[in-house]
Amino acid sequence: MIRNKAPYDSYWIDALVLFAVVFLIVYVVYRVNTVLVYNWDWSFIPGYLFRWDEELQSYAPNLLMKGLFTTIRLAIWSIILAAILGFIMGVMRTSRRLFPRMLSRLYVELIRNIPPVVFIFVFYFFISSQITPLLGLDNISEDSSPMTLKVLDFLLGPPELLSNVVAGIICLALFEGAYVTEIVRAGIQSIPKGQVEGGMSIGLSRIQLMRYVVMPQAVQKVVPPLASQFIILIKDSSIVSLISIQELTFLTMEVATSTQRVFEIWVFVAGMYFVISYACAFGFSRLEKRMALHKA
Amino acid sequence: MPDNAISTETIIQIERVSKWFGDFQVLQDIDLTVRHGERVVVCGPSGSGKSTLIRCINRLEEHQSGRIVVDGNELDYNTKHIHKVRCEVGMVFQQFNLFPHLTVLENCTLGPMRVRGLTKKEAKSQAMEYLERVRIPEQAHKHPSALSGGQQQRVAIARSLCMEPRIMLFDEPTSALDPEMIKEVLDVMIDLAETGMTMICVTHEMGFARTVAHQMVFMDEGRIVENAAPEQFFSNPKNERTKLFLSQILSH
Ligand SMILES: Nc1ncnc2c1ncn2[C@@H]1O[C@H](COP(=O)(O)OP(=O)(O)O)[C@@H](O)[C@H]1O
Ligand SMILES: [Mg+2]
């Protein structure tokens, strides 16, 4: 057997790259330590993760952990909403009728061509003034039983912040829904025309075709890109800190102001984002491999 | 075989049908009558419009002028007529077009359950009957991707038959198959012919055509150039292009 593979003989390039990277790190650390004369102090961080609760006589999550939980809740709920919205819009995008197609196109183009920050400001104003009062979220803590409050607390966080969190979820969902729409559209359009024709030839209606032939296949194709969109969403969720949603980035800003240890806290929080994003990516890729094995 | 009962009753009537793709005319003034129980084989060079013609019969393509009437239902913009026709006309494609996410059995029960309203149990036992007819009952619980091309095409035939159609259309059903699998599919089609099914087959399998056809149709450049009984078609074709085509295809 003749293999058409050149032997790997460019080790010197690797060595050069490695050397450059190491040099850069050493240089940055050197600058920070000697030139900035920065005194690193990480000791305050654990106290902002958990605090000792005198009343309960146990540890309770402090700002950073609370922020992390809110971020995760935001990401999960908004991906669910975005998936529903994106699913509907994605189906409309592939409709034969002009009106649904146009509506969905308008939505996608609107969101893709406005900076996220601007979008969030515009919609926050609308949502917080119109939608959350409509849902009656502001006085929910007075009207509900302790049991519902407990469930709500687990699902959406502290009741007193409910309208705040819901506004954040709706903003993110609207925003991410546009990307999900494109994912769903691509999924539907990736199903070969022969599938639709096969279905038509046995008399299935348009709706039955969607329901029994196209969608089940499209969903399989949509799951992996949807998973990566979820990870993007975890990171993008930091943007709602701008409208005072009390998630990780927002609370970190508070910690940064009160402790004045700006460098440490942001480096640490970058690490937190990295860990959850990376863990999700790892989990999803494991899941995907599992699913691939199952099918084979 | 060709002399078993064809009635005098017309089941498909195609009159002066034309169709364009943009500026390009794919079908030009097509006239064709198929009687109940009749078997028509359509052949002709690639691109001559054979697929387009039979796809017009179950409205996978829309014709732009002329008339197509299938078992009393005219194909027009009335979706009820289209639905009725599709329930009565089965189609087998070159690329099988089986549903890859469903098992063989589910492929066969989908239409009967959702369109004809059979219960799951009825649909299953009926599907097994047809899978036996195409000699593949043991594969019922596999997914199509686990089957050979010939097996997949036989499943596709069973899937169509489960709708209990009165007419079957075949669009080059053996063209995508490895040579050793062609026979198993043709044998199933010959069995089907023996049951008296009305069939229109686009195929270049001339041995098969000789065995089953009542009517041979030769198409070229969107027209029906020759339409004759098989004896005459093979021994004494009138048209020069038919002669050329036959000499090319039979010399293989
Ligand atoms: N959807 C389509 N759009 C444009 N042209 C098409 C389309 N389908 C088929 N054609 C053209 O119409 C002609 C006839 O096609 P077809 O009916 O598939 O021929 P055949 O089955 O005899 O090979 C070909 O030239 C083909 O390129
Ligand atoms: Mg063709």
Image (cartoon, grey):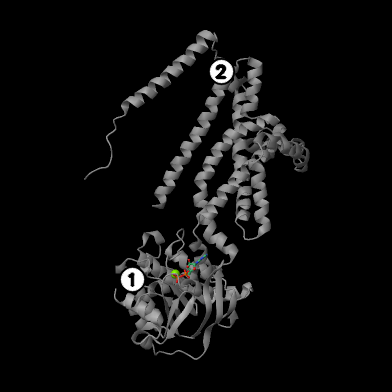
Q: Which residue does the image show at 60% across and 56% down from the upper left?
A: A94
Amino acid type, callout 2: Glu
Residue B32 left/right relative to A142: left
For disc 2, the chain is A
Q: CA distance from mark 2 to mark 1?
A: 72 Å
Q: Position of residue A287 (x, y in %)?
A: 45, 43
Q: Quadrant location of residue A205?
A: bottom right
Looking at the rendering, the quadrant in which ligand 2 lies is bottom left
Identify residue for label 2: A264
Q: Which residue does the image show at 50% across and 50% down from the upper left?
A: A221
Q: Quadrant location of residue A76?
A: top right
* Beta carbon of the mark 1 residue lies under 8 A of ligand 2: no
Q: Is residue B159 above or below residue A99?
A: below
Q: Depth check: give the residue in front, B1 or A40.
A: B1
Q: Which residue does the image show at 66% across and 32% down from the upper left?
A: A240
Residue A273 appears in the rendering: yes
Res. B182 mark: 1
Amino acid type, callout 1: Ile
Q: Position of residue A268 (x, y in %)?
A: 54, 22
Q: Is residue A8 above or below residue B210?
A: above
Q: Do residues under tags 2 and 1 come within 8 Å of each other at their CB atoms?
A: no
